[in-house]
Image (spheres, rainbow, N blue to C red):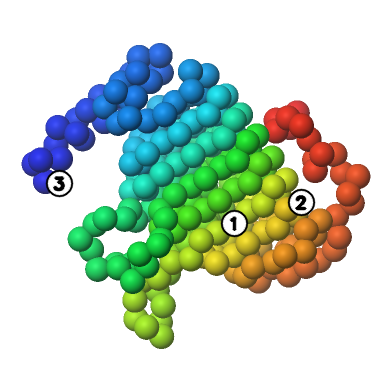
Amino acid sequence: MRLVSLPIFLIKAFLVLLPWQVKRPFLQLFFKFELSPSARIGFSWVYPKRLHLKSGSTIGSLCVAVNLDFIHLGENSSIGRGNWITGFPLGTNSCHFAHQSNRKAELIVGNHSAISKNHHIDCTNSIIIGSFATIAGYGSQFLTHSINLDANIQDSEPITIGNYCFVGTACIVMGGASLPDCSVLGASSLLNKQYADDWTLYAGVPARPIKEIDKNSLYFSRSIGFVI
């Protein structure tokens, strides 16, 4: 670590240890984060360049969120315990991703959506999760970057998860993939392409359409994100 970074590192480490009521005004003062009075961050290292937490949104304890340009959590959305959220911000001197001037290292989560526990979310490029969506279970990986073997460069593509989607446990979602609205990605599936047909269960390695979803299923008509 460069010596010029040490004071900022020490401030960040000190703030992590503070109770939320004390930590919140300091995060707003030092880092210009936009934090609703009813939002909350637990015992976690969450330091993107910009952070917007809307009313009722939460980030649990033991999370790490670093090297991102932007994180936005919509109203009453949540990131659970133990999530690892990383990226590769713009404006560095690195040659990595220099060919992608329009890339966005960001995580955007809509209203009433939930990311459960112990997932790895790579936001080298944009990850957009719609409203009333659930990243369920444990151990899923969202990977927006990889090596382009033909060009021998690091490359990245965005990921989109639609409204009222359900992603099962231990899934892998690759850059460039898209899960349409009102769809389910079955447990342990690999989503590596864009799909457009909503009301569909996708599953397998790689994932493919399996069957239509019953449109009377109550999950897909919730007005409150929390599932009892």
The alpha-carbon separation of the residues under discs 3 and 1 comes to 34 Å
Left/right of residue 214 with respect to residue 145 in the rendered view? right
Residue positioned 65% across, 71% down in the render: 206
Q: Give the structural element (helix, strand or loop) at label 2.
A: loop
The alpha-carbon separation of the residues under discs 2 and 1 comes to 13 Å
Residue positioned 33% across, 25% down in the render: 27
Determine the residue located farthest toward the top in the rendered image. Answer: 21
Q: Quadrant of residue 62?
A: top left
> Against 171, is 49 above or below?
above
Of mark 2 and mark 1, the one earlier in the sequence is 1
Q: Amino acid at mark 2?
A: Cys
10 Å neighbourhood of mark 2: few (<14), some, or many (≥20)? many
Determine the residue located farthest toward the bottom in the rendered image. Answer: 150
Q: Position of residue 34 (x, y in %)?
A: 42, 29
Q: Position of residue 130 (x, y in %)?
A: 63, 46
Label 2 sits on residue: 182
10 Å neighbourhood of mark 1: few (<14), some, or many (≥20)? many
Of mark 2 and mark 3, the one earlier in the sequence is 3
Left/right of residue 135 with respect to residue 204 in the rendered view? left
Q: Amino acid at mark 3?
A: Met
Q: Give the structural element (helix, strand or loop) at label 3.
A: loop
Of mark 3 and mark 1, the one earlier in the sequence is 3
Label 1 sits on residue: 160
Residue positioned 77% across, 64% down in the render: 197
Report whether residue 137 is seen: no
Q: Amino acid at mark 1?
A: Thr
